[in-house]
Image (cartoon, rainbow, N blue to C red):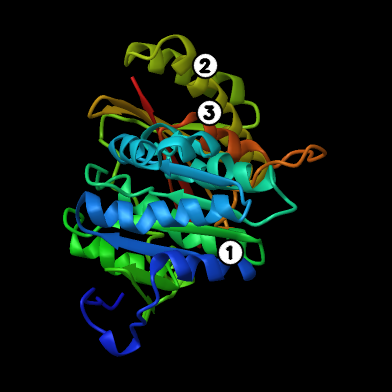
Amino acid sequence: MTATNTNTNTNTTTTTTTSTKTAEATAESFVHPALFYRGEQEYVDGTVPFVRDGLKAGHPVAVAVPGANLTLLKETLGADAESVLFLDMTDAGRNPGRIIPRVLRAFADAHPQTHVRIIGEPIWPGRSIVEYPACVQHEALINPAFQGRDVTILCPYDAERLAEEVLTDAYATHPVIVSGGTHRPSPSYAPGQVVADYNRPLAQAPASAEPQPFGLDELPVVRHFAVARGAELGLTGVRLDDLALAVAELTTNSVVHGGGSGSLRIWAEEGQLVCEVRDRGQLNDPLAGRRPATPDQRGGRGLLLVHTVADLVRVHTDADGTVIRFYLGC
């Protein structure tokens, strides 16, 4: 992916303010700008008018950002905060794979008859290098997930503290960049390419995590192994139930859709339990597991359930098969 300097391309810069530009966007369908901010004042200047313009227009507004920024916006908005849905992204979006179905779509689908505004900040300083690829894919997948929907999703990026690679990727996942109160089209917008580029082989599992092969007849055995191993590694209560559910869904998917068999590995890594299921199937739909289930839907909920209970889900798929690795905090 070609790097893009965030201070270049001034010839395409407009002088329209954030407040005015986002107000105009309400006449369009889906709008997905990235806001590059430097410090609290630029954060407030780029987000508060967006919220207040939406409220004045009678549009539902949700704010899903990390805790410190959540507090800042609540305090700055004052009485207007009472009309906004606030979510702490460090909790609601801990797993980037559940942000679309459980945060963005959940709010937009609750207001199908009107334009909706959302501030979503899924990438913040402190995100791990293991989490980051899933974050970038999430940002890219917002675009096909909301194509044609009457929604504006503004994504803030801390341009002072995030790595240059992160800002470069933001150019590729957002069609419009907002910086210093100005808007400009991204010269390197290519969300589909981002999804493909970050479909990378996962780091090798430790040698101590021996694969447990399974087919249809071994499903009960491998699930029992997973729960027992999870307990040995420190999972208890609800977290152990989450492990059992996720393993059941993924191993069943392997048998039904992944060639009839697969293998499972479990290990501990930096305070988390890691579970990996590998099979010979191909996952051709990058939005699989990221669409909310419809009330009448039969089947197709397995990966969605895994995204719901896990703290992180990483996927790699190619002609040889698919690897799905999920993480649970111990």
Residue displayed at 38% across by 14% down: 235
- The quarter of the picture where residue 175 lies is bottom left
Distance of label 1 from label 3 (alpha carbons): 28 Å
Where in the figure is residue 111, as x and y percent of width and height?
69, 46
- Please determine whether, in this image, residue 292 is positioned above or below residue 327: below
Q: What element carries label 3?
A: helix
Q: Which amino acid does label 1 sit on?
A: Pro
Answer whether labels 2 and 1 touch (C-beta < 8 Å).
no
Where in the figure is residue 313, as x and y percent of width and height?
43, 41
Residue displayed at 53% across by 28% down: 247
Answer whether labels 1 and 3 touch (C-beta < 8 Å).
no
Q: Is mark 1 on a helix, strand or loop?
A: helix
Q: Which amino acid does label 3 sit on?
A: Val
Q: Which of marks 3 and 2 is in front?
A: 2
Where in the figure is residue 128, as x and y percent of width and height?
25, 43
Residue displayed at 47% across by 51% down: 51
Distance of label 2 from label 1 (alpha carbons): 33 Å
View extreme (right): residue: 296
What residue sits right under mark 1 in the picture?
144
Q: Residue 247 carries which label?
A: 3
What residue sits right under mark 2 in the picture?
241
Q: Which amino acid does label 2 sit on?
A: Asp
Residue displayed at 74% across by 39% down: 299
Q: What element carries label 2?
A: helix
Question: In this orientation, which residue lies closer to the viewer: 97 or 14?
Answer: 14
Question: In this orientation, which residue lies closer to the viewer: 134 or 206?
Answer: 134
- Please determine whether, in this image, residue 3 is positioned above or below residue 61: below
| Left or right, 75 with reference to 151 | left
Q: Which of marks 3 and 2 is nearer the N terminus?
A: 2
- The quarter of the picture where residue 57 lies is bottom right
Q: Which of marks 2 and 1 is nearer the N terminus?
A: 1
Residue 45 in sight in this render: yes
